[in-house]
Image (cartoon, rainbow, N blue to C red):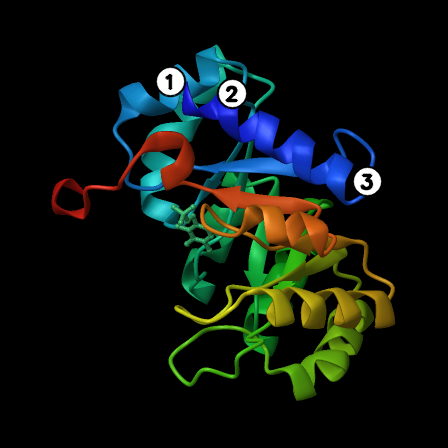
Amino acid sequence: MALEQIRQQIAAAEAAAGRAAGSVHLIAVSKVQPLERVVAVLEAGQRLFGENYVQEAAGKWPDLRVQFPDVAVHMIGPLQTNKARQAVELFEAIHTLDRPSLASKLANLAQARGQSPDLFVQVNTGAEPQKAGVLPDALDGFIAECRALDLPLVGLMCIPPEGEDSRPHFAMLAGMAARNGLKGLSMGMSGDFAAAIAAGATHIRVGTAIFGARDYTKA
Ligand SMILES: *Cc1c(COP(=O)(O)O)cnc(C)c1O
């Protein structure tokens, strides 16, 4: 299946970049995919998945975790503050921390629960008005705020602008993470994950290249 080819491409990209085998985590983005495709990928051994919608994840993963207890699911879509409580119960990591109101909500939940998912700060590297993410200029201040709240920041995430060369955005994100002492780099999708690995990605988010096209009319 496509998953095996992606694994080989990841291994080749790791080797080409002089990186250790297995240093890149493949997040299989299962949003809007039919359940049978998700189960097929689980049966092929994949255990790390990404979802964009709290509601969809809530309808799918609690059941799948019964059968596949060692699975991890990461939230990679925009997170509304009023869904944060549900999100911290569903996900091992959230890649889309992008504003102070969400940071303080997650901090309150972490205090109350005594645990928190790992958190990536989403950066709007292209400063696109319609896109979520902290603007590059505001990032260091926002990270300081999150650290003051004791949030478990593990890295940065970006979605480069459509139709642009991703590489300068990946390089920018890597520089911002290094400057802030963050090891995690969530970057690279179906079309550009090899370039992301070359730029230091630790988590690549691959959907269509594994599962095939998404059919939003059935979502
Ligand atoms: C849907 C999505 C992906 C996967 O995109 P593909 O092009 O299908 O690989 C990755 N990251 C985010 C944030 C997404 O929303």
Residue 177 appears in view: yes
Between 20 and 122, the residue placed more toward the observer is 20
Type of amino acid at the residue the image marks with label 3: Arg
* Earlier-in-chain disc, 1 versus 2: 2
Q: Which residue is mark 1?
A: 39
Residue 19: image tag: 3
Between 33 and 164, the residue placed more toward the observer is 164
* Earlier-in-chain disc, 3 versus 1: 3
Disc 3 versus disc 1: distance between alpha carbons? 30 Å
Secondary structure at numbered mark 1? helix
Q: Which residue is mark 2?
A: 4
Q: Are marks 2 and 3 in contact (CB under 8 Å)?
A: no
Residue 112 appears in view: no
Secondary structure at numbered mark 3? loop
Left-right relation of 66 to 60: right
Q: Residue 6 at x, y = what percent?
A: 52, 30
Q: Quadrant of the C terminus?
A: top left
Q: Residue 13 at x, y = what percent?
A: 67, 39
Disc 2 versus disc 3: distance between alpha carbons? 20 Å
Q: Ligand 1: does it lie within 8 Å of the C-beta at label 1?
A: no
Type of amino acid at the residue the image marks with label 2: Glu
Q: Residues within 10 Å of mark 2 (few under 14, many from 20)?
A: few
Disc 1 versus disc 2: distance between alpha carbons? 15 Å
Q: Residue 150 at x, y = what percent?
A: 80, 62
Residue at 47% in and 73% down? 132
Q: Ligand 1: does it lie within 8 Å of the C-beta at label 3?
A: no
Type of amino acid at the residue the image marks with label 1: Val
